[in-house]
Image: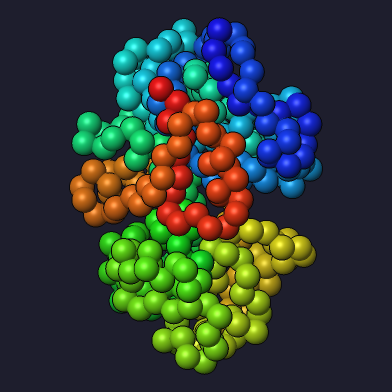
Amino acid sequence: MMRALRYAAYGPIADVLRFEEQAVPQPRDDDVVVRTHYVGINPLDWKLVEGQYRRFARSRPPCGVGTEFSGEVLRVGAKVDAFREGDRIAAWLNPSFEPPRALAEEVAVPAAQCVRVPDSIALDIAAVVPVAGMSALQLIELVEAQPGQRLLVHGAAGGVGTFVVGMLRDRGATVVATGSARSQEYLRLLQPDAQVEYVTARSTWPGPFDAIIDCASTLDAAAFRDLLPHGGHVAVTLPSFPGVIFDPLLNPFRGVRRHTLRLEPKASQAAQVLAMIAEGRLRVHLTHVYPFAEAVEALAKSRSGQARGKLAVAIA
């Protein structure tokens, strides 16, 4: 038997989440079973528990929690030849197609959703890479960021924003990061070229910009026009209707082209982010690791909006 964090009904995380004993998972032909060491915490996790994406996700109760993790391979399916027992891996679960379940002592996951962790990277760091790291990489691709361009990263102190700032600096872009007054000290650790408190007048922000990555999804069309007077790309992390439907159709006719992240996890991109970390090109800001017994507190910290960088839960 093993312990897992689960919920039987949508609702507030403090009310519905419970630790349960479950049978250990057995691999299907294309699966690996992983002894979980660390689980990355993302806003997506508690939003799924609250039912915010119930129309689109497979995370319908009774269900587990958690979408990114790291650990060691325990067992492999009959058709798996890419991994073997003892391999150190990072992996992800896509709630659009499968139930989240990373916050458990063992997890069965398709081998295609796993990547090896370089020996130089600790497993706590590897656990927080798949969701936020791939999200950041795909946001940067959406705005077609180039060396020498000036980019605004709005809401840069969160998990995704932290990765975006580091990746843009690695590309040779000029980066301006926004955050709350409380976030300014943390933002300095990211070493953007400039940083601003988002409550200040936009006319004082050091633009104009070539592109905007809005990790808070709070800037409006007027802000885009002010900050991108010569046009450019905008990418946001959260969908808004009807824009998410019509933006791809209207963008060819716009000066400011708007994009919404629709994360498509790819093993090649997860491996790319891990390689950047191993080579010293990208720093991961893991700000707190909670014990498994305090997993609900970790989710509550994420939900509070006060978390800086990435949070993780230690399982084993």
Residue 75 occupies quadrant: top left
Above or below — where is 143 with respect to 4?
Answer: below
* Residue depicted at 47% across the width and 16% down the height: 33
**Residue at x 44% of width, y 49% of height:** 310
Residue at (58, 21) in percent of width and height = 4
The answer to which of 271 and 312 lies nearer the viewer is: 312
Tell me if residue 273 comes above or below residue 110 in the rendering: below
Q: On screen, 161 above or below 207?
A: above
Can the viewer see residue 136 in this picture? no
Q: Nearer the viewer, residue 25 or 22?
A: 22
Residue 149 placed where, x, y %?
Answer: 36, 77
Res 8 quadrant in image:
top right
Number of residue marks? 0
Residue farthest toward the bottom in the current orientation of the protein: 203
In percent of width and height, residue 223 lies at 60, 82
Residue name at image x 54 percent, y 68 percent: 214
Q: Can you say which quadrant of the picture contains the N terminus?
A: top right
Q: Is residue 57 above or below residue 250?
A: above
Residue 45 in sight: yes
Percent across and percent down for residue 259 are: 59, 65
Quadrant showing the C terminus: top left
